[in-house]
Amino acid sequence: MDVRKKVLLVGIAVAVLSAAVATQYARITIGYEFSVVHPSDGMIRFVALDNASDGSRVLRVRNNGTTATMNLSFGDIPKGMNKTYSAAFAIVNEEPFEVNITGVTVTGSESDAVRIWLHSDADTDATGDTSVMLWNGAALSGYWRLAAGNGDETDMDGAGTSTPWDTNDFIRYAAGTPTAVSGTDDFVWVQISIDTNDVAAKGDYTGTIEFQFEAQT
């Protein structure tokens, strides 16, 4: 009789231990939602300013009625020329918190001919301005702090400068050239130079420019 009781107790102990380490499964469904908006109307906006040689904005939108993709068009550049757009466009933060621009990557043909700065004054060459160079043919370390925005795609620099719609290039543009201060203003000017001195031959060259952002929310 005592032997049977001991066996039973051992059996119960094993069963309890097995239950303690068993895996449990469950399913929970959570919905999600998002909206795809025009590149000029996002919470991080790219706002045009400088014109290219063809009279259109350097920064323009292609396929506005469908995919609405942004494109930079620098035009025809002679061999041996360094062509600079001191305000190719502005990057504007509309988020209600600070966003840092932490880097840039350029990929494509002759990407080492591209130079990119973030800087304060749209009318001044970045090399003589308060600036951060992020690409000199290869990635450089540096960052610019965009202050919190106001969530309004019709302006920048707080509400100080309007960003109306360009009906020809399908993008918003800056109606003024305010000065940007890192950590204080919600925008920064982007200067881009194309140096063709070391480009191998005549031809058409294409690529992509990717900006990296970081925020503490």
Image: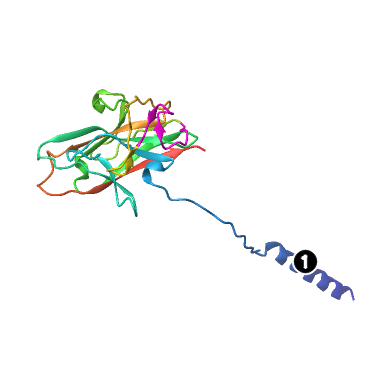
Say which amino acid is labelled 1: Ala
User: Residue 81 sits in which quadrant?
Assistant: top left
In depth, the one of 143 and 84 nearer the eye is 84
User: Residue 211 sits in which quadrant?
Assistant: top left
Q: How many labels does the image show?
A: 1
Give the residue at x 40% y 42%: 41
What's drawn in magenta, residue-wise?
148-164
In the picture, measured across the screen, residue 79 lies left or right of residue 13, that is left
Give the residue at x 15% y 49%: 204
- Say above or below: 80 vs 157: below
- Say above or below: 144 vs 37: above
The quadrant in which the N terminus is found is: bottom right
User: Residue 125 sits in which quadrant?
Assistant: top left
In depth, the one of 159 and 82 nearer the eye is 159
Q: Any magenta on residue 128?
A: no
Give the x, y percent position of residue 163. Answer: 36, 34
In depth, the one of 40 and 182 nearer the eye is 40
Principal secondary structure, stretch drawn in magenta: loop
Give the x, y percent position of residue 147. Answer: 44, 30
Which residue is tagged 1? Answer: 13
Give the x, y percent position of residue 206. Answer: 21, 49
In the picture, measured across the screen, residue 47 lies left or right of residue 36, that is left
